[in-house]
Image (cartoon, rainbow, N blue to C red):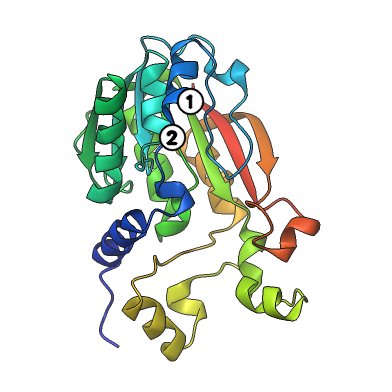
C-alpha cells in the first residue's frame, strides 16, 4: 500500500461522516441555542455529560477557539453564550454546519478550515479559551496539538479537552457486540495504521472511515503538562447508549480543564 496522506484521508472521511449526519455531525436545536443565550450552556465535549457550569462562568466576551468542533454543536453554543468564537475543523462540511446554525439563530462566529496540529493562522496569545471536543484520536501526534493550543492561548487562558480513554482501543467493539464478549484484541498505544493488518487497513481506507490513534495517558495528560499546562480539573464520561459493552465496566472518555500559567 502506498503511503497514506493522513490529513487528506481524514478530511475526506469527515466530510462523508458529516454528510451522513452521524451524532457528532448533527447541529444542535434552536432550543439549545436559546438556552445558551439565557445562560444555560449545554456544552458537550464527550457523548453524554455537559461541561460543568462552573467552568463556563464569565465566558461572555471572551475570545474562544473551538477546535475539531465543526458540526453545528460546540461553536454555536459558545457564541450564543456571548463569546467571540472561531471554529477550526479539518472538514468544510462540518464547518458549514456551524455557519448554518449561526445563520439560523442570528449568531456571529468565524470558521477556518485547518488541521489542529497546525494553527499557524493564529499568532501567539490570541485566545482566552480553547475548547476541543474529543477529536485528538484523529491526529498521530497529540503532543504537537497541545503545544499549538498552549501557544495560541493568552497567559491565564484555559483549555477544555475531551479525549478517548486509551483502553477503549484494546477491543473490537463490533465483534464484541456480535459475540456478547469483550476480548482484548490490541495492545496499546493503538493505531489503525500500525495495529491493523494490511487487508483491514485497506478496507478502512477504501470505505473512507477516519483513521484513529489511541495515544497514551502519558501523551494525553502528561503531554499537556509537558507543553506547560497545569491540569486543574477533570471528569469522566461513558460512550453513547449501548454501542459498546465496555460501558458496563469502565468510562470510555474524559475531559480535562487545563490552565496556561
| Place of residue 233 in the rendered image (x, y in percent of width and height, measured from the top left) | 65, 28
| Place of residue 250 in the rendered image (x, y in percent of width and height, measured from the top left) | 76, 54
**Dot 1 crowding, Cα within 10 Å, few <14, some 14–19, many 20+:** some
Tell me if I can see residue 129 in this picture. no
| Marks 1,2: beta carbons within 8 A | yes
Of residues 154 and 54, the one drawn nearer to the viewer in this rendering? 54
Which residue is identified by label 1?
A: 32
SS for callout 1: helix
Q: CA distance from mark 1 to mark 2?
A: 6 Å
Task: Tell me what residue is drawn at x 37 percent, y 33 percent.
Answer: 66
The label on residue 199 is none
| Place of residue 20 in the rendered image (x, y in percent of width and height, measured from the top left) | 36, 59
In the orientation shown, which residue stands out farthest toward the right?
249
SS for callout 2: loop
Task: Tell me what residue is drawn at x 51 percent, y 38 percent.
Answer: 161
| Place of residue 185 in the rendered image (x, y in percent of width and height, measured from the top left) | 66, 79
Query: Residue 128 falls in which quadrant of the image?
Result: top left
Number of marks in picture: 2
Which residue is identified by label 2?
A: 28
Of residues 104 and 249, the one drawn nearer to the viewer in this rendering? 104
Q: Quadrant of the N terminus?
A: bottom left
Task: Tell me what residue is drawn at x 49 percent, y 21 percent.
Answer: 261
Residue 24, placed above or below residue 128: below
Residue 180, placed above or below residue 113: below
Residue 108, placed above or below residue 192: above
Amino acid at each position: 500500500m502506498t503511503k497514506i496522506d493522513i490529513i487528506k484521508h481524514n478530511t475526506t472521511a469527515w466530510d462523508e461522516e458529516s454528510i451522513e449526519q452521524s451524532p457528532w455531525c448533527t447541529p444542535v436545536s434552536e432550543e439549545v441555542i436559546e438556552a445558551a443565550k439565557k445562560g444555560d450552556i449545554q456544552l458537550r465535549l464527550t457523548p453524554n455529560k455537559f461541561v460543568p457550569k462552573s467552568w463556563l462562568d464569565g465566558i461572555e466576551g471572551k475570545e474562544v477557539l473551538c477546535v475539531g468542533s465543526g458540526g453545528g454543536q460546540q461553536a454555536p453554543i459558545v457564541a450564543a453564550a456571548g463569546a467571540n468564537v472561531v471554529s477550526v475543523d479539518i472538514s468544510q462540511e462540518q464547518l458549514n454546519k456551524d455557519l448554518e446554525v449561526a445563520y439560523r439563530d442570528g449568531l456571529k462566529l468565524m470558521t477556518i478550515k485547518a488541521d489542529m496540529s497546525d494553527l499557524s493562522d493564529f499568532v501567539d496569545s490570541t485566545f482566552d479559551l480553547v475548547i476541543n471536543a474529543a477529536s485528538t484520536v484523529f491526529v498521530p501526534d497529540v503532543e504537537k496539538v497541545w503545544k499549538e493550543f498552549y501557544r495560541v492561548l493568552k497567559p491565564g487562558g484555559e483549555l477544555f479537552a475531551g479525549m478517548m480513554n486509551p483502553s477503549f482501543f484494546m477491543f473490537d467493539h463490533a465483534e464484541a457486540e456480535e459475540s456478547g464478549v469483550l476480548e482484548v484484541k490490541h495492545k496499546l498505544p493503538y493505531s489503525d495504521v500500525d495495529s491493523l493488518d494490511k487487508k483491514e487497513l485497506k478496507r478502512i481506507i477504501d470505505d473512507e472511515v477516519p483513521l484513529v490513534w489511541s495515544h497514551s495517558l502519558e501523551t494525553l495528560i502528561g503531554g499537556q503538562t509537558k507543553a506547560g499546562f497545569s491540569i486543574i480539573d477533570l471528569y469522566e464520561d461513558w460512550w453513547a447508549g449501548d454501542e459498546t459493552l465496555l460501558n458496563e465496566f469502565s468510562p470510555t472518555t474524559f475531559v480535562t480543564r487545563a490552565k496556561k500559567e
